[in-house]
Image (cartoon, grey):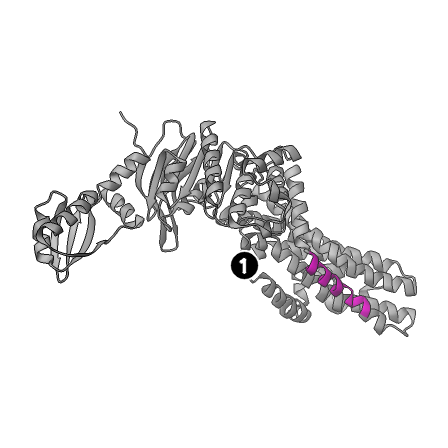
Amino acid sequence: MTLDPAFVEHPSIEIDVVSKWFGQKVAVSNLSCSFGPGVTGLLGPNGAGKTTLLRLIAGLTDVSDGRVTILGVNPRSHHAVYRSVSLVPDEDSVYEDMTGRRFVRYAAQLADTDASPSAVDEAITLVDMQAPSDRLIGGYSKGMRQRIKVAAALVTHPEVLILDEPLNGTDPVQRAHLIELFHELGDHGKTVIVSSHVLEEVERVSSRVIAIVDGRLAAAGSVEAIRAAMNDKPYVVRISTDRPRELGSALFATPSVSSIEAIPDAVVIRTQDIAGLGRDVPAEAQRIGARVLSFQPQDESLESVFRYLVERR
Amino acid sequence: MRPVLALFTVSVSQALPRRRTIMLALLELAPAAIYLFATNSRTSAAAFQGVIEIGTSTFLALVLPVVAIVIAAGALGNERRDLTLSFIALRPIRRSVIALTKVAAASCAAIGLNVIGALALGISHTVRFGNGQVIGGLVAATIVASIAYASVFVPLGFLTDRAVIIGMAYLLIFENGIVFALSGLVLLSPWRLGAATIAGIVDGSRVFFDGAIGDLSMQRALVAMLIYALIGVGSTTWLLRRRDLA
């Protein structure tokens, strides 16, 4: 029997039919999945419910329905679990009037772990923040804030590290450094969850992905599987031309076209082979002597891809 | 113990940012200045009445509550507003311990500032008229009233951004208005717990308080302060457990 790709064999975190609503707004709906050692990407467009899900996992927010366990316990009633869990929130949850070094030391002290200068230095070095660590956080850039938050999370040596959009605001060098760091943590058996709304970012960070949209599970599994599922999605393309009827007829005979509709000045095509259509359109236009004025995918956004995946699931 | 100590230390230092601390400390000196001006040419007995009356009307009933409310309302309110509450909440510290530490830190910060006003007033009187009992009474009153205010306004500050405004309305309308008319409500006025403490410590001072504290004894005031503290810590714990945290 094969395991549903939304679940892992040895979970550190289990989400069991969890829902969360705020008044009339449903943020997470009947979501079930699990996370285990290694890096997992949590993918979804903005407003998909990623942050809410991470906050539910961390125990900052209570579930409206369902059950969340982390390392086998409900974090809202077993605070000792926070010795082994760290969250890096997306928002600027930092003390502006502290230095970066003091902030990291404070995190270690609150977790009752080693807060010695060497332990603090080690965490700061991991995120390459040695130089600005004695400056006030209030003067930090977004990328520096992200990294000092990661340092404050790592100083406690957590088994579970939850990162909400940790690469936001970082430059390419910092980004590569952080991604390498997350890989190392995953390779050492830590459970690392990294959320992002950018597929390419998640692809670089993790091999396993949980994709959510509108608070529901859209897809789960390897990045390759998610990409394959996304490639099945039918695309709608609007092609502006001086001869819509003729071009429509010519393209209808090609294998890349599923359906076709001619409108004044344009032809609207539905296809599951966007690359094939990209080859067929210029070839057929040249053959019949039509001028192609524009080639516009109508629903190319990540949201539309995710919505398709949710509907299909 | 170390996490609690760290939380306490940082909470106290955050309650007393430099600029605000200087402004509030200057405010604390106002009652002593008024006292010195008002009793410039008085006799010892009249000055004693003056220190009690000015100590009540300007220090206990105005400066002390304002300072305590501002500090206490920010103890958790600022953490919530600045989104740093999750930084504290996601630690292996029980919610009740966080609540107790926050109330204790707010109380200590409020006492630390208010004791400036108490000492300034008490020392002004003692230096001129030699009655040291007043200093002890004012300091004890500061401790009792500051703890009571902090216990109320730490949870209220967590609950709403308008805690300071609510506190000012409570102070000016309820405590300094309605309770004067309905003396049965004296236990609901934290500064009156302080006034009762002065009346219990400083010989001969009760006669100058009667309109404000009725027959409230120091013992009942201390019990009431403990109840305030228990309710404050309990309600803060409940809020930290039940509410979604930023």
Q: Position of residue A6 (x, y in %)?
A: 33, 35
Q: Position of residue B47 (x, y in %)?
A: 87, 69
The rendered magenta stretch, by its main secondary structure, is classed as helix
Residue sticking out furthest to the top: A1
Side (left or right) of A288 relative to A19 = left
Please say whether residue B174 is one of the residues in the magenta stretch. no
Q: Position of residue B110 (x, y in %)?
A: 70, 56
Please state the chain letter of the residue tagged with numbered disc 1 in the rendered image: B
Q: Nearer the viewer, residue A151 or B137?
A: A151
Q: Quadrant of residue B207?
A: bottom right
**Amino acid type shown at disc 1:** Thr
Q: Position of residue A162 (x, y in %)?
A: 46, 39
Q: Nearer the viewer, residue A182 or B83?
A: A182
Callout 1 crowding tier (Cα within 10 Å): few <14, some 14–19, many ≥20? few
In the image, is residue A5 above or below residue B59?
above
Which segment is the magenta one? Answer: B18-33
Q: Residue at x 73, y 55 (%)?
A: B111
In the image, is residue A119 above or below residue B72?
above
Residue B214 visible to the viewer? no
Quarter in which the N terminus of chain B is drawn:
top right
**Residue designated by label 1:** B160
Q: Secondary structure at mark 1?
A: loop
Residue B229 visible to the viewer? yes
Please say whether residue B19 is one of the residues in the magenta stretch. yes
Q: Residue at x 58, y 39 (%)?
A: B93
